[in-house]
Each structure stands twice: as structure tokens, then as C-alpha cells.
Image (cartoon, rainbow, N blue to C red):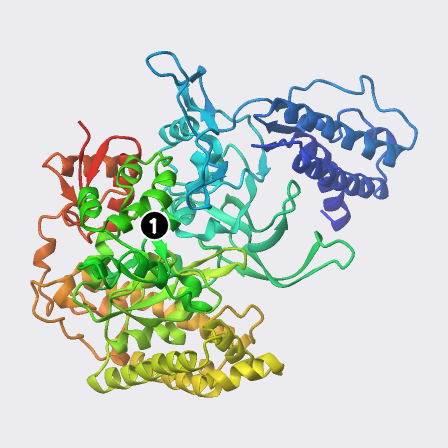
Amino acid sequence: MDIFGNAYNAGKSWPTTIVTSRQRYGCCGSGNFLYVTLEHMKRLEGEVLNLLHDLGESQGLLELEGVTVDPHQFLGLEINPRAARIAEMVLWIGYLQWHYRTHGKVSPPEPVLRDFKNIENRDALLSHDAVDLVTDEAGKPITRWDGITTRISPITGEPVPDEAARAEQYVYRNPRKAQWPTADYIVGNPPFIGASTMRRALGDGYVDAVRRTWPEVPESADFVMHWWYIAAETVRAGQAEQFGFITTNSIRQTFNRRVIQGQLEAKKDPLSLAFAIPDHPWVDAGDGAQVRIAMTVGGREVDNGRLLQVRDEYRNERDQDDIAVQLYERRGALFSDLKIGADVAASESLQANEGLTSRGMMLFGAGFIVTPEEATNLGLGATPGLERYIRDYRNGRDLAQSPRRVMVIDFFGLSVNEVHERFPAAYQHILERVKPERDQNKDRAISQNWWLHGRTRAELRNHISGLPRYIATVETTKHRVFQFLCASILPDNMLVAIALENAGSLGVLSSRLHVIWALAAGGRLGVGNDPRYNKTRCFETFPFPETSPAQQARIGELAERLDAHRKRQQEQHPTLTLTGMYNVLEKLRSEESLNAKDKTIHEQGLVSVLRELHDELDSAVFAAYGWDDLAAQLVGRPGATTPLPDKPEAQAEAEEELLRRLVELNTQRSVEEARGHIRWQRPEYQNPAAATPLPSPLPQGERGPVEAVVASEVPPAAAAAGKLTWPKQMREQVAAVRDALAQGPLPTDAIAGQFKRSPKAAVQSVLEALEELGMVAKSAENYSLAR
């Protein structure tokens, strides 16, 4: 058939296609998204009808009643009855506005408004028989602190929970999965609620019901991932064509990425990502809050997904809530981290790097933090032994910006009676400043052990025990910088501590190679949309180079000089910050002009010297990997410590090749470890039964493809014999942990040690979930089955 005939037949089929297409929105609110979808469908309908008119189709067919887009094709679920009614009216208003713009004063067919019942007033996740108020034995409602209201303490003058502000507790009777109406396309922006705030926002009863009903969604995942999972399952089953959601940009974080990756890697009918914008500015229409969002579209059998990334963004001078963006597009296979290129997200954690990293202390009470003067008043320097329990403390701002010079009370290892008897002044301090807040925490372990930090990080204490220093980096920060901290300093939860004391390790981590890997493997977080260093994805997957003694010495020497240089200049200039120094370094590499403030920072920080040290270090690490060809393309370029969105094509290609090689090396190391050859970072700590790490079978630059690893030279790992495989599904993981605890009380490490690859983080996550549900109890560092 000729081109005209093809266009005619295609156009003639489009009205029927449009009017039979049904769109569904799983949490429709007041209907804004459905209205926008209706408007776009009407525009598409108009384009098709205009084409048919131009091709000679009669006006009668074009106006045939029923061959049109109207509100009955747009379905919604909304739990708020008022919002559900508003959503339905918004659809009809939008439809009528479009009709009168198109047809003038011609009235639409009667009846004008029809009750299609397409906006359902119900929960999108749960169906249930009833919602019951929780009461005590006397029939009095059980309540909790509402999680929001505070009062001023008459003793400390600081805000503390207001015990009078109570919220009633509810349980859901016979909760079960809600069934969504059948639709061709699913769109929406479900609630932006993080996993850690779900209970405060939604209540314990609802959260417990959701988690019991939807065990397929990890408890660490954000609330929105329940919608994402349901929509993905629907599309994979062939019950919908595609889905598209707006979520927070934390969808790329590991705890959310697991949901996406499971759908993309499903053995049967895997999902494909057809479109993604990983990071986009967004102003909430309700409160004007500025957040960062991601957009994803899932479908089946998509060959080349579209990745749109924000290259530049700027505000409308007249309307500050209007943010314009400049996007650039790439096409290819989209991975779970919403990236195209090397599949960094699929890299495996390496045993060689496990058991060395931890986030710092999670206090659950700002009253633990004291100034040196306050510490002195509490007895530091006068009360024997107190120096062991009041220590220097550092958080992310202390490292990246100006240090606060604060200390922290840390009574780890002491009972409350011991604290009361030995250190009464410090006891009273936390009694007044910590206990009121902890009393309101529903986590029994946290409320009962109020004199201890909420997360005491026993594993971190073990990691750094006996070390004079360790490596630390700020978890979420603009510039990815690593430095040594004295082992006497306790790190905050916003720091990632790496229990390695040798300067060679600091040098590799500080190199451009590792930073590029960390930027690709991690996510973004915070108001500043800064890169986040996830210890599991960024550190444990990273394949360190096999270095000769000379290479190790050279990298170590440069790392020591780098660390000393920054600390020396900051000591000499107390207002000098690492962020300021690296902002100026980035300007030097980009050949940008320095303003007066930049010039002061350049002089105080000797930033040109800093640049030279980094360039020499990068060259030395590239040489250790045997990748000098990439060094020529990357050393000295901008974007070595922070993301560079608009990078030259040659640099982008070189970074993509670097990631490809690192992914391949990660795969090679995984194969080696499966055969028993593990290149421990700290063999004396990680694997004390082995004397020394095994030598590399081949020099780094001479290795062939993954299949070339020689297995006959590598003895099997005796420690792995007889160990169980850690289950992939949550239900089986819970059963495995309960079986382990049936033997008696055990710490996390002992439970994880019963499984191959010692999945400590996963075991800890299951234990915390079971503790939250009251199925296990924690005493000190041991867990046991609840009686």
C-alpha cells in the first residue's frame, strides 16, 4: 500500500485505540495528574481527527458519539473521600473546558455529567474488614506520642516530646492486598514517605498491616515502592501496557533499588525501563517545599530506554516556584540505578572488603553531645575512669565544614546502675536531656536502654579495636573526600567509617578511580542533592588493585602527604573548610576565574599543591591497575571528587570505559572468591585462620577475561564448607534467622557467620524487623527468640 493509504488506515484506527485505552492513577488526590493525562489524550485525539479530516474523512464519522476521549477512561483510587469527589469533578471540568474550546457554544451530549464511578474512595494497598481502636484491659484507648508536638523542658530549656499530645492506635482486621481496576496505563505520584518515617506518618497499625500484606517489598524501602512493585507486576503479567511514576530521587538508593532490580532481573517476563529522569527539581504544590524527584516508566521488551538528565536548571525571575531545566538525552539499556552504560548496580559485594565498614553512632538523643567545658563540669579530668566514656565526636559537618569541637557521652558496656554509681553527674545530665525523648520511642530496646546510644555499633567498635586510626568519609556530601581519624574519635551516623589504617588504602579510596565508582554505585540525597556513599554498594563491591611493594609505598606516601597537607592548612586557618578547598580545586581544573573569596581559600589551603598531590596520586593508582591509557584521558580533569554533569565527550567515554573495566574486574574477583581465592584487605582481622593473603595468579596488567582465572592454584576456602546459602526472599530470610536463634541467644556476627559470604547487613536488617514486631528480643549485643 502507498504512504497515503498507510497514513489513512493508521489514522482511522487511532480513535478506537484512544477511546478503549483506560488510564489508572493509584493515589489520585484531587485529580491533577488525571486531568493532565486527559488533556494530553484530548490533544492526541485532536491531532488524529485533524489528520483524518485532511485525508478526506467525513465530518459525520468524526463527530460520532463514543469515538472520543471522556472521563470514563480515567480511573483513580483515593482514600480521602473529599479528594475523591474533587478528582471526579476536576476530570469533568477539564473535559467540558476542552469541549467548549473545541466546539464553541455547541452543547455536549446529554446527560452532561455521568456517574461512571471511576474514582473509587478506598485504599490503594489494603483491603480489610474493619479498623479497630486498640484499647487496654479497661477499655481505654492505647495512645502514643504523636511524634510531632514538643514542649520546652523546665530543666534544660530545650524542646522535649509533649507527652500530652497523643495519637490513638489502630489495628486492621483481616488485611489483604487491594485489587486495582484493570487499565492500559498506570500513572501517578504516590506519597513521598520514607521507610524511617512511615510509622510516624501513617501509624503503627497501618504500617504493620502493609508490611504483613506486602512482604515482597523490603521494609527498608520507601512507601512509594509498594506502588512501583504492584505496577511492575501488573505490566509483567500483561495486564497493563506501561506505568509511570514520580517518586523522590531516593528511588536510586540501594534500599529502593532492590525492588527495581528484582523486576528487571526476573527470570520470567522481566520488566524494562522505557524512560527515566533520575534527578529533577520539584516544588510541592501543597507546602512549597523544594525536593528532588525521579521519573520512571516501566514496560515490556523495551530495546532502548530513554535517559534524560538535567544539565542545567534555573528559576523563573517572576515565579520562584517555576524551575526551568535543560535536559540532555541518551538511549540504551536502563539499569536499576537509572543509568545507561556499565552495569555498576549488578556488581557483587566482595568478601575481601566485607566486615570493615560501618556507619557511625546513631545517638537517638542530642543530650549525649557536650562541649569540652560541659564535659569538665560533669567530671572529666577529675572523676577516675570517665575519660573512657566521654570522647571526641565528629559528624559530617565537622569534617566537611567547620568542626564543632564537641564530645559525646558513651556509656557502652555499662549498666544503668553502674553509670548512676560511678558517674552521678553525667547520669543526671542524660537523665534530664535524653530520657524524656527516649521514653516516647516505641522501640523497646531504645526506650529501655535509654542511657546508651540508640545504635551502639558493636560491629564498628570491633572493626577499629586495636587500630591507631581509621578512614572516614561523610556519607552525603558534595565532594567525596576520605581522611584518617584517630581511633579515639567516635564517628556520627552521618559518617562512614572504614577500618583500614594503612595509607595505601586511603590513597586508592581518595583516587579518581574510586570516586567515579562511588558516584556511579551510590545515589543522591539531601536538600543539596549531594552524592551518597553507600558502604555496601560503593566500598564492598570495589575491586582494589593488586600492587607491588613499590606501588604500595608510592601510593601510601602520596596519601600521607595529602592527608597531612589538608589538616595542616586547616589547623593554621581555622575557618578553612574542606568543601571550600575542593570547590576552588574544581574551579582550577575547570579553568574558571577565582573571585576574592576563592583566592583567599586558594592561598590559605595551598590549593595548587593540593591539586598536584591529587594528580600524582591518581596517576599512581591508574598505574597500579595497569590502566595508564585512561590516566592520560582523566588525570587533572574536573569532576574528580564531585559530579560533573556537562563533561567533554572524550572524558565521558573514558569514565565509561573505566567503569566497564572495574565492573569486569569485580566479576573476575567474584569468580575467584567462589573458587576460594580471597584478597583480604585486613587478613589478620577478616580471616585470622589464614596466615597471609594469596598472591595474584597474574600481574594486574596481564590478566585475561574472567574465564582465564586459574582455579587449580587456589585451594578451596575451608571456612565456606558446610555453610548455608543466604535466602533471597524475605520470608525465607526470616525463617533462617529464627532457625539460627532456636540454638540460643546469638549476636549478629555469629548468625551471619552460619551463611556463605557472611551477610551481616542483611541479617541485621531481619533482626531489627523481627525485634520491631516483638518476635525477637535483644539483650546487650545478643538476640534471642521472644518468649
The answer, for residue 355, to whether it is visible in the render is no
What is the residue that sits farthest to the top in this orientation? 138
**Could you say where residue 362 lies in the image, as x and y percent from the top left?**
34, 51
Which residue corresponds to the image point at 82% horizontal and 33% vertical from the top-left?
Answer: 97
Which residue corresponds to the image point at 71% horizontal and 53% vertical from the top-left?
Answer: 322
Looking at the picture, does residue 388 appear above or below residue 737? below
- In terms of image quadrants, where is residue 714? bottom left
- Please state which of residues 461 and 619 is positioned toward the viewer in this rendering: 461
Does residue 174 appear to the left or right of 119 in the view shown?
left
Does residue 151 appear to the left or right of 1 in the view shown?
left
**Could you say where residue 571 lies in the image, as x and y percent from the top left?**
40, 79
The answer, for residue 340, to whether it is visible in the render is yes
What is the residue that sits farthest to the right in this orientation? 105
Does residue 502 appear to the left or right of 120 in the view shown?
left
**Could you say where residue 227 lies in the image, as x and y percent from the top left?**
49, 36
> How many residues crowd mark 1 within 10 Å: few (<14), some (14–19), many (20+)?
many
- In terms of image quadrants, where is residue 632? bottom left
Q: Which structural element holds mark 1?
A: loop
Which residue corresponds to the image point at 23% horizontal and 87% vertical from the top-left?
Answer: 550
- Please state which of residues 179 and 775 is positioned toward the viewer in this rendering: 775
- Please state which of residues 571 and 378 is positioned toward the viewer in this rendering: 378
Where, quadrant-wise, is the C terminus in this rendering? top left
Q: The residue under label 1 is which amino acid type?
A: Leu
Q: Determine which residue is flagged by label 1.
A: 363
Does residue 7 appear to the left or right of 282 in the view shown?
right
Looking at the picture, does residue 189 appear above or below residue 277? above
